[in-house]
Structures are given as structure tokens and as C-alpha cells.
Amino acid sequence: MNKDLAIEIRELSKSYDSVKALDKVTFDVRRGEIFGLIGPDGAGKTTLFKILVTLLNADEGSAQIDGLDVAKDYKEIRTRVGYMPGKFSLYPDLTIEENMEFFASLFGVTVEQNYDIVAPIYSQIEKYKKRRAGRLSGGMKQKLALSCALIHKPSVLFLDEPTTGVDAVSRSEFWDMLFNLKEQGLSILVSTPYMDEASRCDRIALINNGHVLDIDTPQNMVDNYDLQLFGVKSNNMYELLKILRNDSGIANCYTAGEYHHVVAGSGFDAAALNQRLAANGLSNIDIKTIVPDIEDVFIKLLSNEQQ
Amino acid sequence: MSNNDYIIEVKDLTKQFGSFKAVDHISFSVRRGEIFGFLGANGAGKTTAMRMLCGLSYPTSGSGTVAGFDVIKEGEKIKRHIGYMSQRFSLYEDLTVMENMELFGGIYGVANNELKERAEDMFKRLDFYEERNTLVGSLPLGWKQKLAFVVATLHKPEIVFLDEPTGGVDPITRRQFWEMIYQASSEGTTIFVTTHYMDEAEYCHRMTMMVDGQIKALDTPANLKKQFNASSIDEVFRLLARGAKRAE
Amino acid sequence: MGRFLQFVKKETLHILRDSRTMLIALLMPVAQILLFGFAVSTEINNINVAVVVPQWSEGVRQNVEKLSANPYITYKGALTPNEIDHYLRAGLVDAIVVYANDFDRIMNDWRQNGVSKSAMQFIMDASNTNIAQAGAGYLSNILAGDMMSASSMVETHMLFNPQLKSAFNFVPGIMGMVFILICALLTSVSIVREKETGTMDVLLVSPVRPLRIILAKMVPYFGLSCINLATILLLARYVLEIPMGNNLWIVILVSLVYLALALSLGLLVSTLAKKQVVALLISAAVMLLPIVMLSGMLFPIENMPAVLQPLSAIVPARWYIDAMRKLLIQGASFGPILKDFVILIVMTIVLLALALKNFNDKLE
């Protein structure tokens, strides 16, 4: 057991019927870090969360929170963790204030006692405290749910897709709040399907189909991207994609917005490609090198796996 | 007033609930075959605006046409000429792929032989053939969404409305989905899409940003980034939406 | 405020804010009592009776007078035998009494020598079997019953419910149903709702013992049911004028046990269902239907097919309804309902044990 670890996961597996939801997942979350679990729906994120917060039992493997075993010491763990499930987990027919009071009472504390820990977040919605939770916007619900998960001063925070379906501004604000909590010493495990949020985490695990593809800091992951990546655009993006697919100098290409991303194969020559594209009748052609982001890393890892 | 180059033309479209202006005098046009991004914060009025364009809700004031039909008087006709796909409801999980196609084909009055032909074509293109008798419920999410898009375009609508079509899928599937959108667009179908993924705005030919019921920006993604001196659409979005007054 | 009270407060708020459900829960028993008490009745209120008399003797005249004097019978006069078919088919009469030719002589033979011979005949319109059966019973009671009593061989009296008022029968039945509906159905739905919305996850990931969560959930529904109990008893006493006997405290005691039973049943359902719809379906199919069909609320258990009779024994409402009938209508004291009471207690313990065994600290 390592004292510097908030969460220690070893070879955790879980199946539903014949489907493997988790397949030997192993990673650690250090004390005081924001650890991001990044992957699409159905990757196993929620199952992993439910095992860690002691709602489900794993089939195999072990996990410890604060040095406590999730299977044996689940009662003790439940007093120490804060949990925000993926679904909106508040009572829509109760007001902001009533929700807060209720969740505080679950842990035998009062809102006043622990006001300091939730203050930075709760103060933003406190003026609406008589409003029912069901009538709040996505951003406010999120703040309330986070306040409720924090009210008992947990040492480890589990946030399962807290930003799904929330607009970019609220999401950005939410990550600012997480950063503040981390500064106060909380360890945070957060999952998200939005790859662009990876950069807000200290370290991330990319997960797909129940197993971990890679674990590292977001920066290292991008730095370790060992393929040559180019962006190509033209006046007709669909035509361009079809031509790129059949080009022998290109290992892989996919849509990515303004520019298609192209993974260079052996003997890739940008100037020659430009000419070939023009010869095919395309115009406004632009080819440039691209700095990969986490999605490019994810796609590389997924493609490797599928081969 | 209808210009054949534009499939959507709205002027001062407004929807008021009591004293609350959910949509406040929006005016814009969408070209035929364009991929048009419709972005905005939660509660900015996107859904309300989209419902009016689909003929599901009457505007309080203003005027406009969709696919050549009046949004106030010809809602029923609009419904027949558009496709619609939302993340929440797409297909019947307890029916097979083919049964879903037949059902929706029937709803939109696609002739049987034509339906079969189109289905075959789609199956081949998407590598779906083996799954045509699989229950939709047992398909992976990404497949369901691709299939939902196919079903929404089965009757060859002139314009397809996509309400957050790519939520929660993996990056490869998301890209395959956009490839389908590109293809439909290159074949002349207009795509009207909302999304929470800011990077997806960059796939669009043009995009709008709604704030507090009004359209605050409308241009190509590249021009918007230039205009706001921002490195990404995400940044543009935050600059615009930060000023939002609607205290949610 | 203690943790438990906070919980109860939260549950109470849920109920109070869902005004539609609360209204239904409070008004349903009232509506049912009034509906069954006044509108739906299987008792004989007004049957049209005609007679066929071959010979107007003194005995026949007296007998017919009894008919025309009875407030629940409308006397339609005398017919010729040829008219019988037409009057019944046209629905002009519900029943026809045909007197024997030598009615007086048969009666005399009966009285003096005990020789039994058919003296009169009832021809009933049996297209409505309920009216036909009840009508025949009623007719033989007022017409033939008299001669029986004269011979002092058989004596029939309608005790406890002399007018055979059906409301008397329905009140215990409604009680048996309403408490299951409110306690079992509403509690199970409210627990399962928390599973469905995900709030149950958060509750479980807290130091509060799950059992306490559940108990707190039951308190307000228990309260609601107590209000219902009071309403039903008041309505039964003062609107339907059911006598009720002197043992109100036994009625309340048995009812409280039944409430506990219903709550345990609700808890058991909530452990089996993951979706509110499923909880509703289980409640409706597994609880409501047997109560209506098998508990003796509508159909007497003795008249059920032999296969179903033992089945009715496992329907808790059967025992509760039986006890309530004895207490409210017969005015029985504790002795006669002891068996019902013990069975209800045993059932409660078994259901609660099953529910607790099924209930888990975790999601699986």
C-alpha cells in the first residue's frame, strides 16, 4: 500500500453476461491530482466508477481507496468519498437549499459546518436557493450536484461524466472549479467523453471497450505521438477524402474539421500530393503539418488495436 | 420571396413564452447543400428555433420558409420534406435494422422497391449487410447513430436536422459520422446540425452562435476565428457566451 | 434535526409536491366508498313482479297482498298464462309468480299433514343473473318464507344486514385494496424512482444504512394510509351508516398490521423492480388483480372453483377483508378474528424477511 496514492486499481475485471465491461484495468490516482478517464460511451467508465464507490463488486482484481479495500471496507469508504453519478442525481422536486440540507444530513453534518468547502461553488447558486432543482439550467444543476457531493468534505471525489450535455462555457467553468478543489488537496477521478477536456487533467487514461489504451500526462501522450500528421483541405472536402483514401502515400486519413487529418505513409510528399489533388480537379488546396491532439492519439491507439 | 439558392430563409423569427423571448428576432439563410452549424449555450434558444424550423411549433412573429414552404402556414408540408434525427429518440431498439427501415420508409411513403434498393445501397456502403436482421438494441452506440442518420435520410429529404447527433461516441465513429454528413452534403442535401463538441463546428461550412435568443455571430468557422482573434471555435464560443445575461 | 427525521422530511416533501398523486391517494378511497356505497349495488331495489292466478282464493289473495305491500317490489298485476312469455321478453316484468290451481288446499295439507307439494312457481328473467338470483331469494323469502315459518320447520332471517345492502360488503373490500395501493404501490414506485434517476446511488454511497433509507421512506406513506383509514371509517359510519360494533380499537390494530404488511410488500416489489413501470406492473398484476378476484371482495370464496380456493388463502387481503367484515358488520370482538389476525402477522413477518433478504447494500 502506498500512502501517496488516493486510488489504487489492480487488474480489475467485470462482466455482464458475456460482455466484458472491464478487462484487467490497472492504474493509480495520486493524492491531490485530477485524473481523467477518457473514452466513449460503453467504454466501461461508469462500471469502473460504481466498483470504486462500492456500489458494484468486481469479478476479479482489487481496488483501494485511501488504502481501504473496496470490497472489504466499503462502509468506511462510503464516509470518505464524494460521488456524482452520470445522471442528474438530485431531487428535482426539492429546492437547492433542501437538496443541500438533505445530502449534508446523510453524512451527519450541516451545511453551516462545512460551508467553507462548498462556498466557492455554492455561493454562485445560493441566491436561487428557494428554486427547485428540476427548474435549473444544466450549468446550475452541475454546480448544485458538485456542492452536494462535497458537503461532507470527502478526500476523494468521483465525478462520472459531469460535463456531458453541458455547453462549453459551463464546462469550462466546471473545470476551473475542479482545479480549485485540487488546490485544496482533494484527489479527483473524473470521466468524460470530450477529448478536448483531457488537457485540463494532470494525468489521463484512455479507455475503450473495457480496457485501458494508455496512461500518461496529456502532454506526454501528444509528445509521444510518433506518426507524421498533416492537415489537408480543399474546396470539396468529400471528394478530397475519397481521393486521399486511395492515395498510396497515405497510411490513414479521417475528417477533423476544417482540415482532414492525414497520417503520412512511407514516401509521403506534400508537394506531389498537392499536384495530384489539383490534377483531380480540386482547388483551394492547402496542406500543412498538424500538431496532434488527444483525439489523434486515441485514433492511433484504436487503429493499432483494430489491426 | 423564395430564392432557389436558399433552402432556409427566416426573417425576424420570434418565439415568446409569456414575457420571455426564447427566440428573439433571428434572421438568417442557409444555402442548398450547405453544412450549417447551429451552436449556442444551454437555454440560448436553439431547440425552440429548431422546432419552429421543423414545423413543430408556431412562431410568435416573423416569417420564413424551409424547403420552399412557409413556416407559419405550411408546417405539415415542411415535415414531409425534411429529415430529423435527435440523440434522444432515433430508432426502435426492439426492431431489427431492416424492420426499422421499413417502418420509417413506410411513414415517409417511400415505395417498397425503392426502399429495398436504398437499404441495400446503405448496407453495402456502411458494411452493415450482416447486421440487417440484428435487433437495433444490441448494436453499439456508434452504429445506432449512423443507422439513425440513414433512416432520417431514407426519403431523400432536401434538408436534414441533426440535434446533437454525435454525443458520446468514440472519435473514429464520430469521424465516420461526419463523413456520412459530407457525403450527403456533396449529393446536395442540406445539413442543419447542433452540437456540444466545439471542434465539430469546424466541420461546418458556416455556423451561427446563439446567445440569449439572438444570433450573435454567423460566418464560416475560419472567418469567425479571425474576427474574434481566437485560436479555436471553443474560444469564440466562450467569448460570446460569457456575456450571456440569461441567468439560466 | 436527526438524520432520520431529515429523511422523513424529504420524503414528505416529495409527496406534498406531487400534488396529483397525493390528491388521488386521498380521494380515491372516498370516491370508491361513495361509488360502491350508492351507485354500484347488487341489492334488490325495485323488481317488477306480476302474478298468474288460476283461481283467486283467500290464501292467494293474502299472499299477493304481501307482494304489493313490499316496498322493494313493484306489483304489476295479474296476467293470463299466455301473456307470460311476452311480458318477460319485453322486459315489462322481472319475475312472475304462478300460483297452483288448488293453492289453499296444498297449503292446508302442508300445515296440517306436512305433505309437501308445489304451491307456487317463480318464473325469473335470468338475463341478469344477479337480479334473478337475488330476486328469487327475496321472493321466496317474503312469500314462501312465511309458510315455512308457519310450519316452524325452517326459519330464515337476514341478520346484520337485513336489507342485504351491498355497501356493507364493499367497505371491507375497499379497505383491503386501498391500503395495498397506497402503501405497496406508492412506496415501491417511490423507491424504484430513486433507482431509476440515480439518486439511490448517491444514497447508497453514504454512511446511512440502507435499511434506514427504506424505513424513512415508509413513514409518510404510513401516515397517508392512517389518514385514509380514518376517512374510510368515518364515511362508513356516518355516510353509509354501517353499525361497526364497539371494537374500534381492534379494527385499528388489525388495520395497522395490514398497513405494515402492505409496506413490506412494497419493499419486496422495489427490490425486484429496476424501473418504475415494472414496479407499477408488478403491483397491478400481482397485487391488485388477486385482491379483486380472489380475496372475496367481489366473489364469495365459497363459490370459487376448487383450484382457486387454496390460492385465495395466500392473498393477504382475503384475511384482512374477512376480519373487517366480522368486526365492522357483525360487531365481533377479538375471538372470531384471531385466526385472521395471526395469519396477517405471520404474512407480514415472512414478507418483511424476504424483502430484507433481497435488499442489498449494493446495486446487485
Image: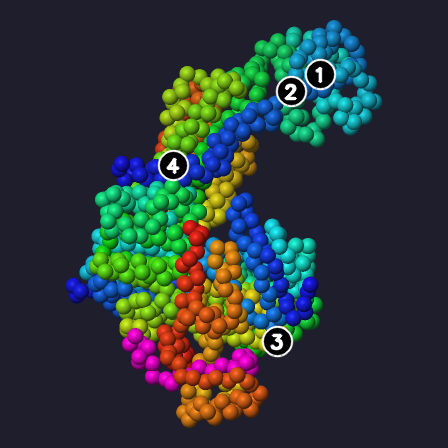
Observer-side mark, 1 or 3, equals 3
**Which picture quadrant has residue C140?**
top right
The numbered disc on residue B187 is 3
Q: Are marks 3 and 4 on the same chain?
A: no
> Around disc 3, counting alpha carbons within 10 Å, would you say few (fewer than 14), some (14 to 19), or many (20 or more)?
few
Alpha carbons under labels 3 and 4: distance apart: 59 Å
* Sooner in the amino-acid sequence: mark 4 or mark 2: 4
Residue range highlighted in magenta: A219-241
**Residue tagged 2:** C45
**Looking at the picture, does residue A179 appear above or below residue A206?**
above
The reply to whether the C-beta atoms of the residues labelled 1 and 2 are less than 8 Å apart is no
Q: Chain of mark 1?
A: C
Q: Residue at x 65, y 9 (%)?
A: C111
Residue A32 in picture, x, y percent from top left: 22, 62
Residue A56 in picture, x, y percent from top left: 32, 57
Identify which amino acid the numbered label 4 is placed on: Thr
* Sooner in the amino-acid sequence: mark 4 or mark 1: 4
Q: Is residue C332 magenta?
A: no
